[in-house]
C-alpha cells in the first residue's frame, strides 16, 4: 500500500507565477520505496490566476478560500490532505533535493517524535543563495519546550525555519491546524507542536526561501510593533497552556 506525504501550499494570487518552480522542486523529490506525495494547493481568494498556473498532475488537489489570510487558507487545505505526514511549502519557495526523503525517514524511524524541521537557504533576487539567519540547532532531537525558550531568549528569533515544518497529521489536527493569526501562523504552530511533542532537527537544508518585496514578512501588518507584540503574547500563552495540560 502506498503511503503519502501531503505538501500544503497556500497561495496569494500575486505569487501564482512562482508556482511552477515550487512544483518542479516537488516533482524532483526522490521518496522512500512505497511513498508518494500529494500537493494540496489552496488559493487565498478566487482570482482564477492560481488554478491556471498549475500543471496537470493527478497528485495536485486545488481549492479556493474567500480571501481570509494564510492561517485560514492553510487549515482549510488540511481538509483535503490524505497523507499521514504534512509538510509546509509556501508558494514562493522551493524544496531542495532529498527534503521529503529526510522528513519521512526521520519520522518513520523515530515514532517518539511528532515533527521535523530543517535548515533553509535564502534565495536572492539574482538567483544566488545565502545561509538563513537562524540560531542553527544541531542535528538531533528538539526536546519539548525548547523552541519557545530559544525564541524568548534570542530576541524573538526562532532557532529554526517554520516553513520547513513536517508534522504528523494527527498531531496537526489535535492542535487545530495553523494558529488563527493574521501572520506568524506557522511560528505559532511549530511552538505549539513543540509544547506537546519532541521534534527532530535535520541539519541538511531542505528549502530555498525566496526573498522578494511581495512576501508576507515584508508587509507592514507583519512588522508593526504593536501587532507583533500581541501575536507573541498569544503564541506564548497558547504554548504554555498546552504544556500545562500535558503535564496534568
Image (tube, grey):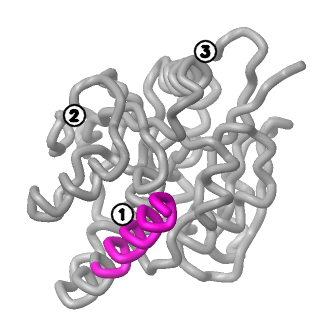
The answer, for residue 90, to whether it is visible in the render is: yes
| Mark 1: few/some/many CA within 10 Å (<14, 14-19, 20+) | some
Residue that appears at 47% across and 32% down: 95
Q: Earlier in the sequence, mark 2 or mark 1?
A: 2
Disc 1 marks which residue?
A: 215
Q: Position of residue 98 (x, y in %)?
A: 49, 18
Label 3 secondary element: loop
What is the C-alpha distance between the residues marked 2 and 1? 25 Å
Disc 2 marks which residue?
A: 137
In which image quadrant can residue 226 be found? bottom left
Specify whether 121 is left or right of 93.
left
Q: Is residue 180 above or below residue 227?
A: above
Kindly indicate whether the residue at mark 1 contacts the one at mark 2 (C-beta within 8 angstroms).
no
Label 2 secondary element: loop
| Mark 3: few/some/many CA within 10 Å (<14, 14-19, 20+) | some
Label 1 secondary element: loop
Query: In the orientation shown, which residue stands out farthest toward the bottom?
Result: 226
Disc 3 marks which residue?
A: 30
Specify whether 190 is left or right of 3.
left
Residue that appears at 28% across and 44% down: 160
Instruction: Decide which of 63, 138 is in the foreground and name it.
Output: 138
Whether the magenta-drawn stretch holds residue 241 is answered as yes
Labels 2, 3: front one? 2
Labels 3, 1: front one? 3
Amino acid at each position: 500500500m502506498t503511503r503519502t506525504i501531503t505538501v500544503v501550499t497556500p497561495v496569494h494570487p500575486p505569487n501564482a507565477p512562482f508556482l511552477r518552480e515550487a512544483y518542479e522542486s516537488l516533482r524532483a523529490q526522490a521518496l522512500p520505496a512505497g511513498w508518494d506525495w500529494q500537493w494540496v494547493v489552496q488559493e487565498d481568494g478566487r482570482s482564477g490566476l492560481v488554478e491556471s498556473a498549475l500543471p496537470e498532475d493527478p497528485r495536485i488537489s486545488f481549492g479556493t478560500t474567500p480571501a481570509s489570510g494564510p492561517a485560514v487558507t492553510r487549515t482549510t487545505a488540511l481538509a483535503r490532505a490524505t497523507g499521514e505526514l504534512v509538510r509546509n511549502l509556501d508558494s514562493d519557495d522551493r524544496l531542495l533535493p532529498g527534503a521529503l526523503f529526510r522528513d519521512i525517514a526521520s519520522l518513520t524511524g523515530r515514532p517518539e517524535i511528532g515533527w521535523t524541521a530543517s535548515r533553509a537557504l535564502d534565495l536572492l533576487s539574482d538567483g544566488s543563495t545565502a545561509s538563513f539567519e537562524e540560531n542553527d540547532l544541531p542535528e538531533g532531537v528538539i526536546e519539548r519546550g525548547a523552541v519557545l525558550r530559544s525564541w524568548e531568549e534570542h530576541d524573538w528569533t526562532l532557532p529554526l525555519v517554520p516553513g520547513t515544518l513536517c508534522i504528523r497529521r494527527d498531531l496537526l489536527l489535535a492542535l487545530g491546524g495553523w494558529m488563527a493569526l493574521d501572520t506568524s501562523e506557522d511560528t505559532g504552530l511549530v511552538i505549539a507542536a513543540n509544547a506537546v511533542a519532541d521534534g527532530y532537527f535535520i541539519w541538511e537544508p531542505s528549502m530555498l526561501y525566496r526573498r522578494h518585496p511581495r512576501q508576507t514578512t515584508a508587509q507592514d501588518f507583519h512588522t508593526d510593533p504593536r501587532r507583533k507584540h500581541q501575536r507573541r503574547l498569544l503564541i506564548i500563552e497558547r504554548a504554555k497552556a498546552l504544556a500545562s495540560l500535558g503535564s496534568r
